[in-house]
Image (tube, rainbow, N blue to C red):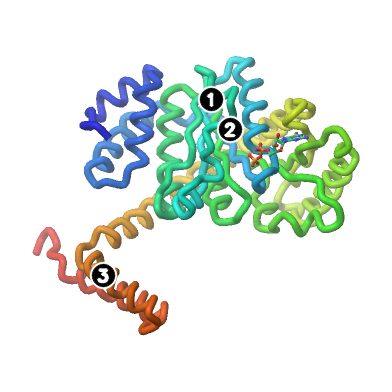
Amino acid sequence: MREAPSAAALAEGVLAGRRAVVARALTLVESSRADHRAVAHELLELLAPHTGQAIRVGISGVPGAGKSTFIDALGTRLIEQGHRVGVLAVDPSSSRSGGSILGDRTRMAALTASEDAFVRPSPSGCHLGGVARATREAMVVLEAAAFDVLIVETVGVGQSEVAVAGMVDTFLLLALARSGDQLQGIKRGILELADVIAVNKADGDNLGESRVTARELAIAMKLMFSEDDGAPPQVLTCSARTGDGLPEVWQAVLDHRNQLLASGQLQQRRLDQQKQWMWALVEDGLWRDFRDNPVLQQASPQIEQALAAGELGALEAAEQLLSLSRKRASTTPTADA
Ligand code: GDP
C-alpha cells in the first residue's frame, strides 16, 4: 500500500461512492499491520453511522454448485431493479493453497463489469478469524458506499459457513440434485444454518431430479425444525443459467428477512452478531499478538524443526509455544506499573 491517506479522507471518498477510494478502504481493512489497523478503526467509526440498511445475504454451496453463475445472474437482475450490489467472499483456503476457490477473476463477468456492483475476492488472511474480520469490515465499507445489497459467498465446508451466517440477515444454501444419497452430500450443520434453500441447475434433463431433491429437502427440513423454531426454510428450485426461479428465490430471501424485521428478530440477530464480532476481534487480536511476539518469532522455527525431525510431538510443541507467549505476557509491564 502507498502512503496511507487519513481516515477522514477515505471516509469522505467512500461516502461519495468513489470506486478507487472504496478499493483502497477495502485494502486497508484487509491489512493486519498495526498502523493500518489504527487507521481502519478510525475509518470504520466514521462509516458506521451510514450503515445498517443493506440487505445482507450469505450464499453457500459446494464448489460447482453454481454460486458465481447464480450471483452474477441474480446481481444483474437486482441492478436492473435499481439496486447496487456488493459481493464479498469468505474463503480461508485462499491462504493455504495460494489460490482461492472464490477468487478467480473470470467469475461473475457481468457484475465485475458493472458500475453498480463491487466484487471483491476473499482476502488471503492467514486464518478464518482474520478473513472473517476483514469481510465484516468490508461490509461496513461497501454499505457506507451505498451498496444496498451485500452478498457474502462461501464454500460449503463448515466453519466458514458459521462465520458467514454470523454476519448476514439471511443464509441461502445452493444445493444440487443428486441421486440416492443427496442428503448425506450436504452436511447437517450447514442445513441447520440455512434460511432458504435453492436446488440449482433445475434445467434441461435435470429438472425432474431437482424437483424431487427439493421435495426431499423440504421434508428433511420440516423434520429438523421443531414448531418453536418457526416456519422451516423455504426450499425452491432454480436455474442460474436460464434465470428460471431466480425471482422466486430472491422473494424467499426477502420474505425471510421481512419476517425477522416484523418480529424484532432482525435487530436481535444483529445485536448477537455484534457480540460475535467482538469475540472474533479478540481472537484475531490474540492471534496477531502471538504471531508478532518476537520471542515466539525467534523460537518457533526451532520448535517447528524439532517437530519435523520427530523430536517433539505436536502437543508438546504447542505447549512450548504457548508457555513462551504466557511468560512474555506476564512480564509485559502494565500501564500503571
Ligand atoms: P461455483 O463453484 O459454485 O461458483 O459454480 P459455478 O458458478 O462456477 O458453476 C459451475 C458450473 O456449473 C459451470 O460450468 C456453470 O456454467 C454451471 N452452472 C451453473 N449454474 C447452472 C445452472 O443453473 N444450470 C446448468 N445447467 N449449469 C449451471
Residue displayed at 57% across by 19% down: 83
Badge 1 crowding class, 10 Å Cα cut-off, few under 14, some 14 to 19, many 20 or more, is some
Residue type indicated by callout 2: Arg
In this rendering, the answer to whether 109 lies above or below 90 is above
Left or right of 105 on screen, residue 10: left
Residue displayed at 68% across by 43% down: 64
Residue displayed at 71% across by 29% down: 251
Badge 2 crowding class, 10 Å Cα cut-off, few under 14, some 14 to 19, many 20 or more, is some
Mark 3, residue position: 325
In this rendering, the answer to whether 206 lies above or below 118 is below
What element does badge 2 sit on?
A: loop
Mark 2, residue position: 107
Asked whether mark 2 and ligand 1 are closer than 8 Å, the reply comes as yes
Q: Position of residue 300 (x, y in %)?
A: 29, 69
What element does badge 3 sit on?
A: helix
Q: Report how far apart the C-alphas of labels 2 and 1 lie in the structure.
A: 8 Å
Which label belongs to residue 112?
A: 1
